[in-house]
Image (cartoon, rainbow, N blue to C red):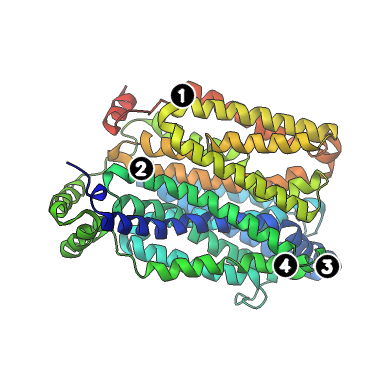
Amino acid sequence: MKNTLETSSGNKSFVLGLTLVATLGGLLFGYDTAVISGAVSSLQSFFIDTLNLDNGEARTVILEYRITVYVAIYIVLFSVGGVLIKLVGRGKGILSTIVLMAISTLVISNNFKDAPVLDEETANSLKGFIVSSALIGCIIGGSLGGIISKEMGRKRGLILAALLFTLSAIGSAVPEVMNIFGVENVTSFIIYRIIGGIGVGMASMLSPMYIAEIAPPKIRGQLVSWNQFAIIFGMLVIYFVNFFIARLGDESWLNTVGWRWMFASETIPAGLFLILLWFVPETPRYLVMKNRDGDALKVLNKLNGESHSARILAEIRDTLKIKDAPWLSYGWMLIGVGIFLSVFQQFVGINVVLYYAPEIFKSMGSGTESSLLQTIIVGAVNLTFTVLAIFTVDKFGRKPLMVIGAVGMAVSMLALGLSFYLGSVGAGALIFMLFYTASFAMSWGPVTWVLLSEIFPNRIRGAMSIAVAAQWIANFAVSWTFPMMNDNTWLTSQFNHGFAYWIYGGMSMLAAFFVWKWVPETKGKTLEAMEDVWNK
């Protein structure tokens, strides 16, 4: 039967309009996580370097930092515990969570047993935590996304995310004015970044879910894939915004005022997202879940035309009758492949490039304005090759793109590390950085998500949340530890800032081997065929 969207321009415009609104969640995802890239040096100057002038304030900040780390890790472990309960059962899941919390307590206590002194190691750790703090919120938001989508709905869940984006933008820009927590200003800043991260985590699940549930089947894949484009586009937009804000004043102005405008700028897309969401409908699937079949039929009439709505409504009712199977129905291999795909996507170091790009270019000898301009080039390359991947993944297959991309990243990172080690960080180093970004954008960026959406059979689709949680945790770990490796005096004296890039290059090589050895090709296979693959 011919798809209604092809014959009704009105319906097509309506579906595309709803998709555009939903992808603003993806744009804010990229915007919020990448805004930090232009402010790293300013945040260090404003929040960390000034602590050397007041030992009392430094001790208080370090104590609050340690408490925040404790609380953040326990929240993450609690979130992971919910996943473990679904995976191995209530008893084993709770026991495993308690053991993880006990081990974490011992490790953290051992690392934080010394008096709160602002030495180099603590300063680097605090800097990394400030940059990566939003990712703690992402883990929380991602874990809550499933509950929120069921209890509040897709639309109201996105409205809540938009409110969190707006609150975070204002609070991050003026943390001393918005400091209702009774803590130091840097801690207030971290809290508001975590709040924004919760919005990102929710949007990372709810935006593609909303698109998938309102899109006609024939074009669903294309429309959902544009959410990834929106994420990368959001990053590119904030790179431009950061660049133009930095040009408004000198270095001193940027370190005291300019960085505030970078975070405050997010209120514009967040406010637009919030306003537009009031005019979009709830998805038919959620309405049927809440026994609101009449409302669901009205939405389906607008989306697909009245001649098809009754049939689609019946199909939605049938799919809701499918019972979830235990997540280990296909064994540990499937779960392991999902987790390692997510972990390797982060361990290759991509978010170090996206979050710390201006700092990396500064270490190559560039000034603030030049480094931000070069970051825009990185964002443009990322966007261009992501679009290319969207149009080639069904032609060349998933595994070839992933393996070739990982090899390209390995060569680039190893060469970039060697450039730093030899002190030769000119145009060649920039080329290595761009080639690395292109390799990732053509492969592990969008294709990882394609694989994750395809390798989990229908009966255990919920198990994908394990991979998503692992991805956010790995992202946080990599983003937090980069300053500890890159700014460490001993490592710098030995490797001249090249050490971290060699680590990411090695991880890229392991990623290539992992995909070649253990990841099945999903091109052209139905989800039913994937069930046969895992059963074997």
Residue 388 in the image: above or below residue 515 = below
Picture residue at 26% right of the left edge, 56% below the top: 11
Say which quadrant the C terminus sits in: top left
Residue depth check, mark 1 versus mark 4: number of the one nearer the observer: 4
Q: Which residue is more in the foreground, 192 or 433?
A: 433
Which residue type carries mark 3? Asn
Disc nearer the start of the sequence (1/4): 4
Q: Residues within 10 Å of mark 3 (few under 14, many from 20)?
A: some
Q: Can you identify the residue that label 1 sits on? A: 518
Tag 2 secondary structure: helix
Question: Which quadrant of the view contains residue 509?
Answer: top right
Residue 462 drawn at (x, y percent): 34, 45
Separation of marks 1 and 4 at Cα, in angstroms: 48 Å
Which residue type carries mark 4? Gly
Residue 270 in the image: above or below residue 120 = below
Separation of marks 3 and 4 at Cα, in angstroms: 27 Å
Q: Can you identify the residue that label 2 sits on? A: 221
